[in-house]
Amino acid sequence: MTDEPDVIVVGAGPVGLLLAAELRLAGAVPLVLERLAARSPQRRARGVGPLAAEALARRGLGGRLTADLAERTAEKARDHGSEKGHFSAIHKIDPALQDEPDRQGVWIWQPELEELLAEYATGLGVEVRRAHTVVGVAQDAGGVTLTVDTPHGERRLRAAYAVGCDGGRSTVRRLTGFDFPGTPPMMTARRAEAEILEGADRLPPPGRQHGGILHHGHGMLATFDFGDTPEDREAPLTAEELENSVRRVTGVDVTVALTGETLRFTDHARQATTYRRGRVLLAGDAAHVHSPMGGQGLNLGLMDAVNLGWKLAAELRGDAPPGLLDSYTAERHPVGARVLHNTRAQSALLAPGPHTDALRDVFADLMDIPEVNRHLGRMLSGLADAYDFPYPSAHPLTGRHCPDLAFKAGARADRLSRYTVYGRSVLLAPDVRAAEPWRERVDLVEVESIAYDGLDAVLVRPDGAVAWASSGEPDAEGLETALRTWFSR
């Protein structure tokens, strides 16, 4: 049992499990606490964006992530009525028009993703304690003490740091006093496995209606309802509530029998003003909540985890350069803000009424312009995101997340992902001698060529962000600056 962990991670969802795994790879000892006694089977999300998919592939999970992918992709296309991506349910984002069409996300339901990540994390030695509910958080100069309700009574657990990965209603965020400003919901979504007993023949085809959006078919019934927000969002969804929502959205009376899983959520959008207060940090939905439009939530949260893990571990080891841990908020907060911004825009484009109808028609026409299509695709995928590093760089790849580069090393063809399984930084360069003093922190790989236009050498951080890149011009000073910035000599 881990009684004195380095970091207590609160929440055993995908973000918490991946963060714990990243910490363990970097030599830290995490402990994961989860209030639920068993993993939830609820299918809350299923879109892992390209950046998060690449992050998991860098750790050797790509094969499992893409198992049965064709079947899962077909299921998604059936449910959404299109194989194309969408902006505010306008399904026109064409993968073939994108700048990097090979960098794709994957479709996997959250319970299956959690199972994959739980096996991965526990295989690394991460301990997960279930039925452990945090009820108190106190920190001092030396660490954090959590008061926890457990099956064996109340306990106090202490660690150097704690990270709240406990969802949109985060207890850690509330007890630590993080500010969480934002906007109230415009609509409420309801989804259920259900049988329509009466009125199915009167329902319009799935799509946008005068009061919101309706989806039905294949044993599923769902509404995006702009006419009602329930007072108690924790209460179970009932057949009567769903029937009333269908009536508001379509004007049609139906009789419904719930046959399985139900889900209710809103499009309220909030973001913590900072992701760190002393020795307590936030990641995933604990740091930001927003409409699931565009399927960006899992991508955003998982990338929080990989950004934070190696930095927090370096802080614990005592070899972090000044300001490294604060760069977590500096880098990830703007990314979260951009997602809140575009999901608010999507909610506005969903609102009922003739003015929005006209705006959607104009917007749909604009999406036929290839440059607009690519812009929206980059926005929703996260591929447009670039961190603003504290040093100049002329190469456009610096600050962006690196694809799985193919390269030649001697007579051998190789790929970057073969060198990233253990969570270390990697330098690919024709001559790596300048980086020898950092060999303990960076894997040095001599290459003849890299299969990426205009790229001769590249330094990739553990989270996949490009810390430095060269197009062939001598830049020893730039490389040393990047190494010192992220990996202290």
Image: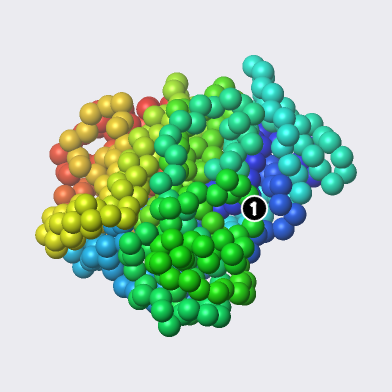
Residue located 15% across and 57% down the image:
362
- Indicate whether 236 appears above or below 424: below
Q: How many marks?
A: 1
Residue 43 in percent (x, y) is at: 55, 63
Q: Residue at x 58, y 49 (%)?
A: 233
Residue drawn at x 38%, y 55% as measured from the top left: 293
Identify the residue at horizontal 17%, vertical 43% (top origin): 472
**On screen, residue 284 above or below 258:** above
Drawn side of residue 323 relative to residue 279, left or right = left
Q: Residue 241: percent from the left, percent from the top?
A: 56, 61
Q: Quadrant of the C terminus?
A: top left
* Horizontal side of residue 392 vs 243, given as left or right: left
Q: State the image coordinates of residue 264 (x, y, percent, origin top left).
A: 54, 56
Q: Position of residue 301 (x, y in %)?
A: 47, 46
Q: Judge left or right: residue 279 versus residue 128.
A: left
Q: Amino acid at mark 1?
A: Ala
Q: Quadrant of the N terminus?
A: top right
Instruction: Tell me if residue 114 can be seen.
Output: yes
- Pick the front one: 265 or 230: 230
* Extreme residue toward the bottom, this view: 201
Residue located farthest toward the top when viewing the structure as drawn: 141
Residue sitting nearer the eye, 436 or 63: 63
Residue occupied by mark 1: 235
| The quadrant where residue 295 appears | bottom left
Confirm whether residue 303 shows in the render: no
Q: Nearer the viewer, residue 56 or 184?
A: 184
Name the image colouring.
rainbow
Q: Secondary structure at mark 1?
A: loop
Q: Tell which of 311 and 281 is nearer to you.
A: 281
Sort mark 1 into few (<14), some (14-19) or many (20+) by Cα contacts within 10 Å: few
